[in-house]
Amino acid sequence: MGEQPPEAAEVTGLLQAWRTGDSQAGDRLLERIYQELKRIAASQLRRERSDHTLQTTALVHEAFLRLVDQRGVDWRDRTHFFGLAAGMMRRVLVDHYRARQALKRSAPDSPPTGPGFDATREAEVLDLDRALGALAESHPRQARVVEMRYFADLDVEEVALCLGISTPTVKRDWKFARAWLNAELRDPRAPA
């Protein structure tokens, strides 16, 4: 697939050094990728209300802290890292919504309101998460394609590189997964 550009090669080297226990590499890595992580987080939060209670910086920091705990992961390269970061950001958002729903259940007489509260959007995100989980059970690669394309804004070539598949396969997977998710979200009881 060709040689990595210098910036990508640097990130890959830092990921590998961090994986082997070099904590300074982790610090340098965060400095190097912080703006890209913010771009991914901003992309995800663009789908939310402008007054969402979870801000871009908080989403980046929470996702990065969770990634730090992923010491057993074989960080292959920059694209692989950002694919995993997108999945982690998705989980942070879903956990945020689940916590809000738990708060609503614990105090049903006073449901959360105010800035950032949108019950419909929360339900949509949780429904998408459930549907994506169901897709991953039967079609794990297609679910990863969705995660990387939708949640990380990776282009087709980056997804192909990360998953080790061809770009036409990514395009087919993306088309299939979107149709599968649309059917699942229309009627979650219907077989996909």
Image: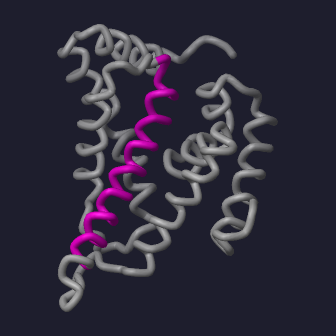
Q: Can residue 113 be seen in this view?
A: no
Residue 130 x %, y %? 52, 59
Q: Can residue 121 be seen in this view?
A: yes
Residue 19 x %, y %? 32, 14
Task: Give the main secondary structure of the magenta stretch.
Answer: helix
Answer left or right for 47 relative to 175: left
Residue 156 x %, y %? 68, 39
Q: Report the colour scheme.
A: one colour
**Residue 82 painted magenta:** yes
Res 171 quadrant in image: top right
Q: In this view, does 143 lie above or below 44?
A: above
Q: What stretch is highlighted in magenta?
A: 76-104
Q: In which quarter of the image is the C terminus?
A: bottom right
**Residue 163 painted magenta:** no
Res 52 quadrant in image: bottom left
Picture mark count: 0
- Residue at 36% across / 41% down in the picture? 37
Q: In this view, does 133 lie above or below 22?
A: below
- Residue at 58% across / 59% down in the picture? 131
Res 121 quadrant in image: bottom left
- Residue at 30% across / 72% down in the picture? 101
- Residue at 44% across / 80% down in the picture? 120
Answer left or right for 130 relative to 21: right
Residue 68 x %, y %? 27, 29
